[in-house]
Image (spheres, grey):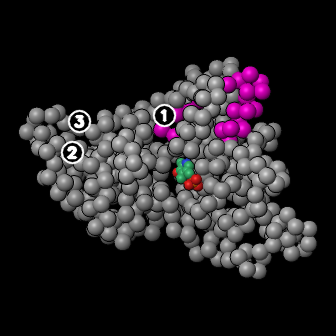
Amino acid sequence: MIYADNASTTKMSITAINAMLPYFDNIYGNPSSLYAFGQEAKEALEDCRARVAACLNCEPREITFTSGGSEADNQAIISAARFGAKKGKKHIISTAFEHHAVLHTLKALEKEGFEITLLDVHTTGLVTPEQVRDAIRDDTCLVTIMFANNEIGTVEPIKEIAEVCREKKVVFHTDAVQAVGHVKVDVQEQNIDMLSISAHKFHGPKGVGVLYAKKGIPLTSVINGGAQERGKRAGTENIAGIAGMTAALEEACKNIDENAAKTIPLRDRLIAGLDKIPYGELNGTLEKRLPGNVNFCFEGIEGESLLLLLDDKGVCASSGSACTSGSLDPSHVLLAIGRPHEVAHGSLRLTINEEFTEKDIDYIIEAVTDVVTYLRNMSPFWRDLVNGARPHVFAK
Ligand SMILES: *Cc1c(COP(=O)(O)O)cnc(C)c1O
C-alpha cells in the first residue's frame, strides 16, 4: 500500500510513541493532585509546555493544550470575538477557503450578530497583505487566515499579513495545522498573535493540539469545568498525548529543511507526471506550496470513482469532493479558487512525505493515468467533451 494522504493524518513517529509510553503505566498520576506522584506528571506537563514554546519561539505561559486543531481554532476565534465585542468590535476577516473548524465557527458567530468578510483567494490560492489592509475596518476585532491550505497546499504570506494586522492593532490568528513541522513557523518573527496546531499532522498522536495566544489576549473557555490550563481549558490533561506531540514537534522542526529537501523533488516529479494527463490542471500555485502537496483537477472524472479505483491499486488518496461525506457539494476550496463545479468534482489530492521513493511516485503516476483513462472511456460526459458537444474547461 502507498499511503498518499498525509494531509489527512500521518503515521506516528517511533520517537513520539516512545515518548508517550511512560505516561500510560509509570507516570499515570493526575497533574492536579498534591502528592509527589501527581507532581511528577505536572512536571512532565510543564516540561512539554516549555519545549513546545521553544519550537514556536514563544513563552510557555502562551501555550494552552487542547484536544486538537479544531478545538484550538474554535477557542482562538471565540476568544478574539468575545474580546472584540466588549469594545463594540464585531467584524471578522477570514478567507473563503479556510478549514471548516474556522468557517463553521465564523458561521456561528454570524448568527450572534458578528459580521464576517471572506477574502477572495484568487486562482493561485493566495491572499495578499493589501487585501487584508483594504478589508480592515475600525470595528474589526480579528483576522484569521490559514498558514497553509489543507487541500491545495498553498502557503500564505503570513508574516506580511500579520504585520498589517499588528500595525492596525487587530488580533491575528492563523490555523497553522498544515504548516507546523513542514514549513518554518516562528510566532515572534512572523508577528502572529494566535495560532492553532494539531499533533497528528506531523507524526504525533491524534486528539491533541495547541493554541498559542500571545500574552494580553484573554482566552474564553470553550470546555467548562476544572481549573486546568490556568482555567482556560477544563479537563484532566492528556499527558501521554502531550508528551507524544512534544517529541514529534521537536523531531519535525529539527528535520524540517532536510525533509523538505527530500520531499520537494518527489512532489515535483509527481506533478510533472500527472501534468502529462490531458485536460487536467494543478490546483493552486506551484511556487508557494507545501513540500508534500499535489492536487489536480481532471475533466470528465468523478473524484469518488477515482479514489475507489486507486484504492484497488493500493494507493490511498483523497478528493476535495465531499460526496462521500453525504454532501453533493464539491470542495469549497476548489470553488474558492474558481474551479467550475464539474471540474471541482474531479479532483485528486496526493500528500506525500520524505519517506517516499521515486519508485512510489512513478507507480502513482502510472496508476492515476490508467484510472483516469479508464473512467473517461466509460463516461458519457467525457464523450460530450471529446465530440465537442460540451466545451472543455482546460486548454489542454
Ligand atoms: C486537520 C486540520 C484541522 C483539524 O485538526 P484536528 O486535530 O483533526 O481537529 C484544522 N485545520 C486544518 C488546516 C487541518 O488540516
Which residue position holds label 3? 393
Residue 87 found in image quarter: top right
Q: Is residue 149 above or below residue 205?
A: above
Residue shown at the point (26%, 61%) measured from the top left: 309
Instruction: Rate crowding at label 2 as few (under 14), some (14 to 19) or many (20 or more) other CA atoms within 10 Å.
Output: many
Say what amino acid the circle numbered 3 marks: Val
Residue shown at the point (91%, 72%) measured from the top left: 35
x then y, percent, for residue 372: 22, 54
Q: Secondary structure at mark 1?
A: loop
x then y, percent, for residue 391: 17, 33
Which residue position holds label 1? 96
Task: Please say whether residue 78 is one of the residues in the magenta stretch.
Answer: yes
Residue shown at the point (55%, 26%) measured from the top left: 117
x then y, percent, for residue 273: 27, 56
Instruction: Rate crowding at label 1 as few (under 14), some (14 to 19) or many (20 or more) other CA atoms within 10 Å.
Output: some
Q: Residue furthest bottom?
A: 26
Say what amino acid the circle numbered 1 marks: Ala
Q: Which residues are magenta?
A: 76-98
Contact? badges 3 and 2 (CB < 8 Å): no
Say what amino acid the circle numbered 2 marks: Gly
Which residue position holds label 2? 300
Q: Secondary structure at mark 2?
A: loop
The answer to whether the beta carbon of the residue marked 3 is less than 8 Å from any atom of ligand 1 is no
The earlier-in-sequence mark between 1 and 2 is 1
Left or right, 60 with reference to 206: right
